[in-house]
Amino acid sequence: MVLLRTLRGPAYTRILGIGDYRPARIISNEELCRHIDSTDEWIQDRSGIQQRRQATPDESVVDMGTQAARAAMTYADLTGSDIDAVICATITHPYQTPAAAPMIAERLGTKNAAAFDLSAACAGYCYGVAVADDMVRSGRAEHVLVVGVEKLSDYRDLGDRGTAFIFGDGAGAAVIGPSATPGISATTWGSDGSGSAMISQSVSWTEAQERYAPASLDMPGDPARPDATVTDSLWPFIDMQGPSVFRWAATAVAPLCERALAAAGVTAQDIQVFIPHQANTRIVDTLVKKLRLPDHVVIADDITDMANTSAASIPLATAALLRSGRAHPGDLALQIGFGAGLTWAAQVVQLP
Ligand code: UT7
């Protein structure tokens, strides 16, 4: 019997480089409140958000993801030909196929790197780091680029003041590669599909049927109505049951952080930085209190400038902390993503 050949990789990995991309246009709360019945004071008080970034209409998830990826590669002193795989975590690339990752890989000049998109919403980046860590340690790839990128402004419902203020656009990326010492801990992750309705991005089937009645077959994509496109009338918005998600995040996420610390074999005393998904400053404050994080721990607060950028929020916040000098290369950081699905993932990483 022949023995199939398998791969074996290095024992440890780490983040070799991190990069971000922030669209130039800043939308203040005041500007947003010209479109929704709200105030700067209410938004800051309930979410901590002071402003968000907005991509231009022709600036895509692929454009933004490529910019962040280039910055991460420069940080790691690597070029496209060094990258073996690209994972793009996003929920706002507007196509089921082709995925964004192969286009990003092509623009970076990789040599036909493996590339795929990953849909785990606000947990997407930490899911990507977990998969990349496994890929490197298994010998499947030497350097994996994980991109978290969102153009949430395309899916923002300005008719819903409960969600319109919360989302922002941007991209962050990390290069994961081999390391002589452990730089990425065991990941803890999971999902709970019973909460799938809490945050959803979909057109309403009822609305679609009403709009195209009485000819029930007369739906977008139907050859009888070539003019009826999905974009002209049934563009999906992100719907969120804010208070339910808030309650879940405020109660369930602290124990998930504790599990992640335990899996990494460290305590809250051992970390220097806490980088939770930037969903709401009140959620972050609750986590800090419940985890009894010591005073020396630096807390990511990028939500004030960027709002909630889903899969992009953790690498964006990491890059901002390093750039500002508040966090330093070599610091141990607990990062946790949580959100739609419901999904969550966390690991302790050594900052590059
Ligand atoms: O990224 C994935 C995970 N996502 C999250 O973790 C987000 C979790 N949820 C949240 O962060 C919060 O639920 C929000 C920031 C989205 C909303 O804050 P909230 O304190 O939960 O507001 P609420 O929806 O409970 O509404 C409270 C009140 C309501 O008025 P009544 O019914 O008490 O009279 C709303 O109608 O505030 C009203 N309201 C607003 N008022 C002014 C809701 N949105 C607004 C608004 N401006 N934009």
Image (spheres, grey):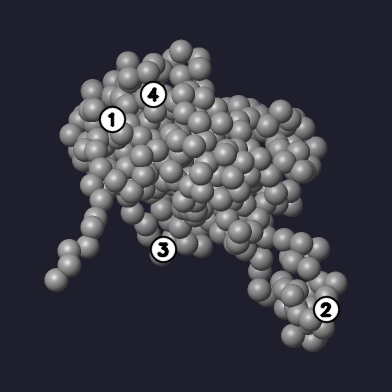
In contact (CB < 8 Å): disc 2 and disc 1: no
Q: Are marks 3 and 2 in contact (CB under 8 Å)?
A: no
* Circle 4 Cα neighbour tier, 10 Å, few/some/many (<14 / 14–19 / ≥20): many
Residue 63 left/right relative to 272:
right
What number is the disc on residue 225?
Answer: 2
Q: Residue at x 72, y 61 (%)?
A: 235
Q: Which mark is nearer the camera, 2 or 4?
A: 4
N-terminal of the pair, mark 2 or mark 1, is: 1
Nearest the viewer among 106 and 332 is: 106
Say which mark, if any, is on residue 193.
3
Image mark for residue 95: none
Q: In the rendered image of this protein, does residue 123 appear above or below residue 319?
A: below
Give the CA distance from mark 4 to mark 1: 11 Å
Question: Could you say where residue 12 lies in the image, as x and y percent from the top left?
Answer: 25, 35
Q: Regarding mark 1 in the picture, which secondary structure is present there?
A: strand
* Residue on which disc 4 sits: 352
* Residue located beneath label 1 in the image: 179
Circle 1 residues within 10 Å: few <14, some 14–19, many ≥20: some
What residue sits 76% from the left and 38% below the top?
Answer: 56
The reply to whether residue 338 is visible in this rendering is: no
Kindly report which numbered mark, 3 or 1, lies closer to the viewer in this rendering. 1
Q: Tell me the distance, in whole angstroms, between the alpha carbons under discs 2 and 4.
A: 53 Å
- Mark nearer the N terminus (3 vs 2): 3
The residue type indicated by label 1 comes to: Ser
**Element type at marker 2?**
loop
- Which of discs 2 and 1 lies nearer the camera? The answer is 1
Q: Nearer the viewer, mark 3 or mark 2?
A: 2
Q: Residues within 10 Å of mark 2 (few under 14, many from 20)?
A: few
Q: Are marks 3 and 1 in contact (CB under 8 Å)?
A: no
